[in-house]
Image (tube, grey):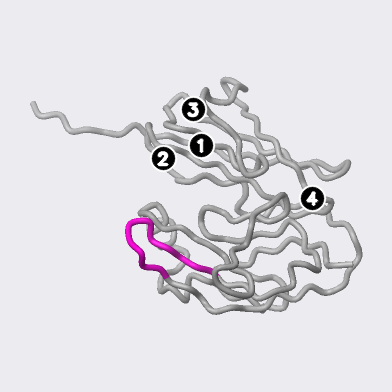
């Protein structure tokens, strides 16, 4: 049986066989979000280009370029490469391929959130921005996801919708009244965990001449 552990291929936890992709395109994690929201898309390829990694209930590519596996299976044994593409030009960068080795292990894994989930893109949105809330957890059987809200109201904002197997909650054109705590609940078998992300929305200021 494959090793049922969750893996983030941006920062490998399995034998240190995958290194941070950002270093091969000459910007680090601190600069990533600034570049990301300027129009950069991330793609992962498997074994050869352009054999792109497909997302499913177990595999997730975050908006910041991280590739996650809720649990590993033997079919995940392959060579992986991170690719970055500008949305305003045809230029891009491709990192080298690194092997992911899947070792035999017992079945089952306790549900666990990676340290930075759930999270929001952008982190400090202005009123009128489109906001993306992401949730992901390690676990086996493959987890399922649900979003809710707490605070002044427990209703999700009008026009919001989920995508990517409910891991992502989209909030189009947020307003100040959409601020609050958004809760991601993850279930796997009989186990359930939840964690919240606080969304703060700033009003866009304008200068007034007297």
Q: Are marks 1 and 3 in contact (CB under 8 Å)?
A: yes
Rendered residue at 42%/56% (across/down): 36
Which of pointers 4 and 3 indicates the residue nearer the eye? 4
Sequence-earlier tag: 4 or 3:
4
Rendered residue at 50%/60% (across/down): 42
* Residue 175 vs residue 197, the one in the foreground: 175
Q: Position of residue 48 (x, y in %)?
A: 59, 74
Sequence-earlier tag: 3 or 2:
2
Element marked by disc 3: helix
| Mark 4 surroundings: few (<14), some (14-19) or many (≥20) residues within 10 A | many
Sequence-earlier tag: 4 or 1:
4
Rendered residue at 57%/32% (across/down): 161
Q: Which mark is residue 178?
A: 3
Q: Which mark is residue 142?
A: 4
Query: Could you give the CA–CA distance between mark 4 and mark 1, rounded to whole angstroms?
Result: 27 Å
Which of pointers 2 and 4 indicates the residue nearer the eye? 4
Query: What segment is highlighted magenta in the picture?
Result: 82-92
């Amino acid at each position: 049986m494959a090793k049922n552990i969750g893996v983030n291929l941006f920062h490998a936890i399995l034998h240190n066989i995958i290194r941070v992709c950002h270093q091969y395109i000459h910007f680090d994690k601190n600069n990533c979000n600034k570049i990301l929201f300027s129009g950069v898309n991330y793609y992962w390829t498997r074994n050869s280009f352009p054999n792109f990694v497909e997302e499913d209930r177990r595999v997730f590519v975050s908006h910041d370029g991280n590739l996650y596996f809720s649990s590993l299976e033997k079919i995940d044994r392959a060579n992986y490469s991170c690719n970055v593409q500008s949305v305003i030009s045809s230029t891009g960068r491709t990192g080298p391929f690194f092997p992911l080795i899947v070792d035999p292990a017992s079945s089952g894994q306790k549900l666990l959130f990676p340290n930075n989930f759930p999270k929001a893109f952008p982190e400090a949105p202005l009123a009128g921005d489109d906001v993306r809330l992401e949730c992901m957890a390690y676990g086996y059987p493959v987890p399922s996801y649900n979003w809710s809200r707490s605070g002044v109201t427990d209703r999700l904002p009008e026009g919001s919708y989920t995508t990517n197997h409910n891991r992502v909650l989209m909030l189009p054109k947020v307003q100040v009244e959409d601020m609050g705590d958004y809760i991601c609940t993850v279930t796997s078998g009989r186990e359930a965990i939840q964690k919240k992300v606080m969304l703060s929305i700033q009003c866009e200021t304008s200068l007034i001449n007297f």
